[in-house]
């Protein structure tokens, strides 16, 4: 699998008022990443790797898309390259399987 990232927003969400990632959206993103990686692990016999579209939230193609001028936080590491809740969920669920 290549070019993985998980936007904080639904495609039709046009808001531009957020300057930092809200806790509720970080938790929703963590839920989504955890569910994805649970499924990916179930198919580990046919999925050999996962490649992300970037490394951390300080640089992402989702800034300005689909809403110009809006910040997005799609990765496992924040703008300071620190792990986000999604990272901890993926790692935590990996140790359970």
Image (cartoon, rainbow, N blue to C red):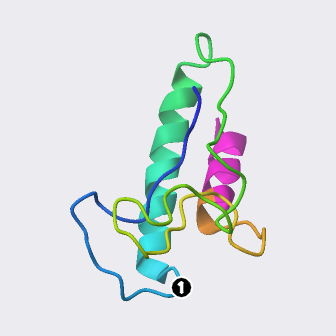
- Residue 87 is drawn in which quadrant? bottom right
Q: Residue at x 62, y 47 (%)?
A: 93
Q: How many marks?
A: 1
Towards the viewer: 70 or 94: 70
- Side (left or right) of 51 relative to 17: right
> Which span of residues is magenta-colored?
87-97
Horizontal and vertical percent position of residue 3: 57, 36
In the displayed structure, 89 sits above or below 40; it is below
Q: Is residue 48 magenta?
A: no
Q: Name the image quarter holding the N terminus.
A: top right
Q: Name the image quarter holding the C terminus.
A: top right
Q: Residue at x 78, y 68 (%)?
A: 81
Please, which residue is most extreme toward the left here?
12
- Side (left or right) of 38 relative to 90: left
Q: Which residue is mark 1?
A: 20
- Residue 7 is drawn in which quadrant? bottom left
Task: Say what secondary structure mark 1 lies in.
Answer: loop
- Side (left or right) of 83 relative to 86: right
């Amino acid at each position: 699998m290549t070019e993985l990232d998980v936007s904080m927003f639904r495609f039709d969400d046009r808001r531009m008022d957020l300057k930092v990632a809200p806790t509720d959206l970080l938790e929703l993103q963590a839920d989504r990443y955890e569910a994805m990686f649970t499924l990916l692990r179930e198919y580990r016999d046919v999925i050999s790797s996962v490649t992300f579209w970037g490394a951390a939230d300080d640089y992402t193609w989702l800034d300005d898309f689909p809403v110009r001028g809006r910040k997005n936080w799609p990765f496992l590491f924040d703008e300071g390259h620190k792990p986000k809740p999604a990272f901890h969920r993926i790692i935590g669920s990996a140790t359970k399987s």
